[in-house]
Amino acid sequence: MSDSATPESSATIPALSHEEPPAELTSAEVADYLQQNPEFFMGQDELLMSLTLPHQRGSAISLYERQLALLRDRNDEQKQRLKRLVSVARDNDRLFDNSRRLVLALIESNDLEQVTETLRDGLENDFGVEFHALVLFNKKPVNSSIRTENPDIANSVLGELLVNLNGGQKVVCGRLAEKELEFLFPNDHPSIGSVALSPLNFPDSVGVLALGSRDENHFRASMGNLFLGYLSDVLCRVLSRFL
């Protein structure tokens, strides 16, 4: 055996690396990093120039163009929101002025006839109410043109509604049963889609005030009823002077 032979055991074996390849970053991690470091792109002009975003029409736009588009969209949204707020404020001002005028006129009424005329004019001309009904509950007819119904008859027709109203609920809104509509609006009930009904409870249950609309969704349970409840409270106290 030759001494010059190189044994296999002396062959050089490269060392194995135990380092794992770096894990790829997820889009969520990148987004989180950029949110925590909003100044990252400062001084990175070349990087910014190379970034593009897919456009809805298929072409690519720069990050800067995308930011401008988002800012324009947000600006438009804010403008629309401001317009809605201004419109609501104007409506509230108009509602307040009309309510104030109607309340003062009711307080200055000298008799039941003037009360009903003032109420009718205010509801129809200032508030655009299509149908309205003022019904008093009394076993004896009132010496006035105001409609009066026997409390027992009213209870037989409006029983469930009166329970809710007398239980503290200021106003009931929505679609009513046919017999309830016929009772409240004898001549117009086929045309009425929705109703707002408020009790007249001062000092006792003396009647109801009902507003009607052709639109089935005009008066609905989710709508605000502060105005009608307030008007009913004022009307109760005015009527109590003449009943």
Image (spheres, helix red, strand yellow):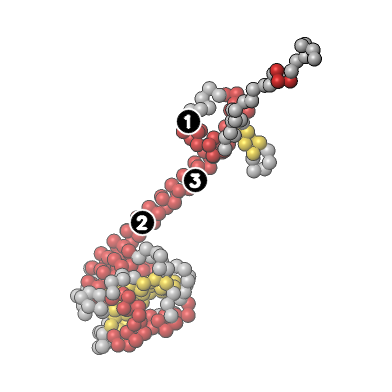
Point out which mark residue 169 bears.
none
Task: Return the residue found at the far front.
Answer: 1
Label 1 secondary element: loop
Find the distance from the CA under tag 3 to the CA under tag 2.
23 Å
In the figure, 133 relative to 93: above or below?
below
What is the secondary structure assignment of the residue under circle 2? helix
Q: Is residue 87 above or below residue 20?
A: below
* Mark 1: few/some/many CA within 10 Å (<14, 14-19, 20+): few
The reply, left or right, for residue 38 in relation to residue 14 is left
Residue beneath disc 2: 92
Q: Position of residue 170 (x, y in %)?
A: 31, 70
Q: Are marks 3 and 1 in contact (CB under 8 Å)?
A: no
Q: Residue at x 48, y 77 (%)?
A: 191
Q: Which residue is mark 3?
A: 77
Quadrant of image for the N terminus: top right
Q: Are marks 3 and 2 in contact (CB under 8 Å)?
A: no
Q: Which residue is mark 1?
A: 37
Q: How far separated are the C-alphas under marks 1 and 2?
A: 45 Å
**Where does residue 124 sit, x and y in percent of width and height?**
38, 69
Q: Nearer the viewer, residue 24 or 32?
A: 24
Q: CA distance from mark 3 to mark 1?
A: 27 Å
Q: Amino acid at mark 2?
A: Asn
Q: What amino acid is found at the position of numbered circle 3 in the picture? A: Glu
The image shows residue 208 at horizontal and vertical percentages of 31, 77
- Earlier sequence position, callout 1 versus callout 2: 1
Depicted 232 relative to depicted 40: above or below: below
